[in-house]
Image (cartoon, grey):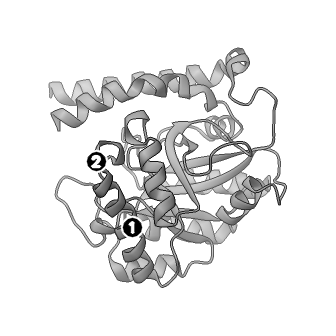
Amino acid sequence: MLTSIRSTSRWYAKKVARFSFAAAAPLIEPFSQNQANEPCVRVLTYHRFGNNPKDPFCVTPEDFEAQMSLLASERRAVSLSQVLSFMNESESIPANACLVTIDDGMRSTLTEASPILQKYNIPAVAFVSSNLVGRELEDLPEAYLNQEELRTLNECPQVTIGSHAHTHRSMGELSITEMSEEATRSKALLTEYVGTTVNAFAYPFGMQRDFNAETDAALRAAGYDIAFTSMHGPVTRHMEPISLPRVKIEGGESLAMFAKISCGAMDNWRLIDDHMWRVQRVRREIS
């Protein structure tokens, strides 16, 4: 009972913090990473989809559809290939462009998200941990995609499959050899599973302690063209394409909040990210 109360209290505290931060965005703008208002892309991070109140990693299908409808109506959704072309300065993008990404490779990516992406013709990248394909773990709210489901997802014209490492461990805490294995093995297995080359990577956890110059080098050596962290912020042309920021989308937030976030209201949450690795480390040690 006490654990449940603490969990609920943390959930409400986080929502108040995010809402307040988004509302204060105009005041924080002077500290923005994109002070010159360069063209940019916001890479939106999702995890799973369903009706799980108080789970920030789970967005309801109804909310996800409303969000994708908004991006479609405003013509702001871009594909991974467009982002790569943008980074190479060979393509322009719409104002407040967004790339949809979905981490972990949970089954609801196929059953809930994919039909909505197809309905609104929204490009997306599904980042999958190759060693977890087909796993059903008791402590998780849903199963991971199996190989057949992963191939079905890959057949969706709107979806590109990317790597979320092999075993979903923090890359930054591994040896050089292990980093290389996580990068190369996941790329090879996922390419084998779906029949198309996997060239994009998203760091598991993706906070400060989870990536560094050595992990970036391992990804380049493995042949990845682009990689994303979980540090907040917009993607601009001058950035290193192997460690790009993203913006987290959480469950339990209004469409108005999504509209603000997708236009930059949470870009400067990176000021919080810079200190979150300490909390993240404690939670991993406890678990």
Can you say whether 102 is above or below 271 in the image? below
- Residue 280 placed where, x, y %? 32, 32
Q: Is residue 85 visible?
A: yes
Kind of residue sitting beneath label 1 = Thr
Crowd band around label 1 with a 10 angstrom C-alpha radius: few (<14), some (14–19), many (20+): many
- Disc 2 secondary structure class: loop
- Disc 1 secondary structure class: helix
Closer-to-camera residue (121/181) = 181
Residue at the disc numbered 2: 174
Can you say whether 167 is above or below 35 in the image? below
Residue sitting at 54 percent across and 28 percent down? 270
Instruction: Place residue 156 in its image quadrant.
Output: bottom right
- Residue 36 placed where, x, y %? 81, 29
Closer-to-camera residue (19/242) = 242
- Residue 144 placed where, x, y %? 31, 66
Residue at the disc numbered 1: 184
- Residue 123 placed where, x, y %? 65, 65
Q: Position of 97 compared to 221: left or right?
A: right
Residue sitting at 59 percent across and 62 percent down? 225
Can you say whether 11 is above or below 255 in the image? above
